Image (spheres, rainbow, N blue to C red):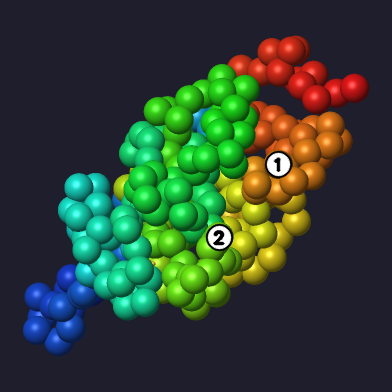
Amino acid sequence: MEIYREALGHAHATLEEIAAGVGKKPKVTKRALARLAAAGKASVEKIGGSTAQPFEGKRVISETCEKNEEKSHLGWEELKATVRACQKCPLLANSRTNVVFGAGNNAADLVFVGEAPGETEDLEGVPFIGKAGNLLTKIIDAMGLSREKIFIANVLKCRPDMKPGESGNRKPTAEEMATCLPWLGEQLRLIQPKVIVALGKTATEGLLGREEQRGQWAEYAGIPVMVTWHPAYLLRAGSLENKRKVWEDMLLVMERMKMPISEKQRGFFLA
Ligand code: SF4
């Protein structure tokens, strides 16, 4: 209560100064208002005896929003149209077939984040299709979810360009990912998921700006991030042990989201 009394005291003194014509008019930023609203909501929940834990609620403030207030007014469809027209990386914009915006539920509690579209994704405009995408779909199904219930996006929305005559896909550079990351930040600001799963080392570095071990919790804009292996890695090194490691990461995600977990689910990939 003391902090509220102090704040009220300051406000009262400021109003008196303004009334007397000696004080400056107070200014407030959108960011400060958002923080005030979030703090007020938290206080009400606390006073009401809520047992909610940190990270369980939807997050309102994103780093991107804070850094980039001019974009924070965009709604979902406006954001999609803006990203689809993006030319920030001229080489990628010229070589892409489609901008791969993302797919799934834009109010999802869970968002999977990969690094960049590959050749098939670029052609179809959909993230995580092909063999690795099919494996990701199986993992999502095993969690009792579906691709329609979650959202899948990449840090980079355009396929990294290839030299003429080269086939396959290349890893996005740190600079490319940093250039595109604000779009993902905007998506996350609008979706407000409870949990993000970062798929693989490159996606983790693109999202967090640093390396992080598999199976560890990190955080992006106040949202908990579980780091796990990319399904493409599991296709190359899909031993029972490795599948179990990724599955244990998903069990942690399910626990964090307070999803029901059956005994059968707990026992997947145990010998
Ligand atoms: S990769 Fe991202 S930032 Fe670069 S052109 Fe595509 S949408 Fe724009």
Taking depth in this image into account, of 92 and 146 the one nearest to the observer is 92
Taking depth in this image into account, of 213 and 194 the one nearest to the observer is 213
Rendered image quadrant of residue 147: top left
Numbered tag placed on residue 235 in the rendering: 1
Q: Is residue 198 left or right of residue 263?
A: left
Against 187, is 258 above or below?
A: above
Q: Residue at x 66, y 18 (%)?
A: 261
> Residue 89 placed where, x, y %?
35, 75
- Extreme residue toward the front, this view: 165
Residue 263 visible (yes or no) = yes
- Extreme residue toward the top, this view: 263
Q: Residue at x 75, y 12 (%)?
A: 263
Residue 55 visible (yes or no) = no
Q: Which mark is nearer the camera, 1 or 2?
A: 2
The quadrant the C terminus occupies is top right
Q: CA distance from mark 1 to mark 2?
A: 16 Å
- Identify the element where label 2 is drawn: loop
Q: Is mark 2 within 8 Å of ligand 1?
A: no
Taking depth in this image into account, of 26 and 161 the one nearest to the observer is 161
The amino acid at mark 1 is Leu
Q: Which residue is mark 2?
A: 168
The amino acid at mark 2 is Gly
* Mark 1 Cα-neighbour bin, 10 Å: few <14, some 14–19, many ≥20: few
Q: Is residue 185 left or right of residue 217?
A: left
Q: Residue at x 55, y 74 (%)?
A: 174
Rendered image quadrant of residue 35: bottom left
Q: Residue at x 65, y 43 (%)?
A: 231
Q: Which numbered disc, 1 or 2, marks the residue that appears first in the sequence?
A: 2
- Identify the element where label 1 is drawn: helix
> Residue 95 placed where, x, y %?
35, 69
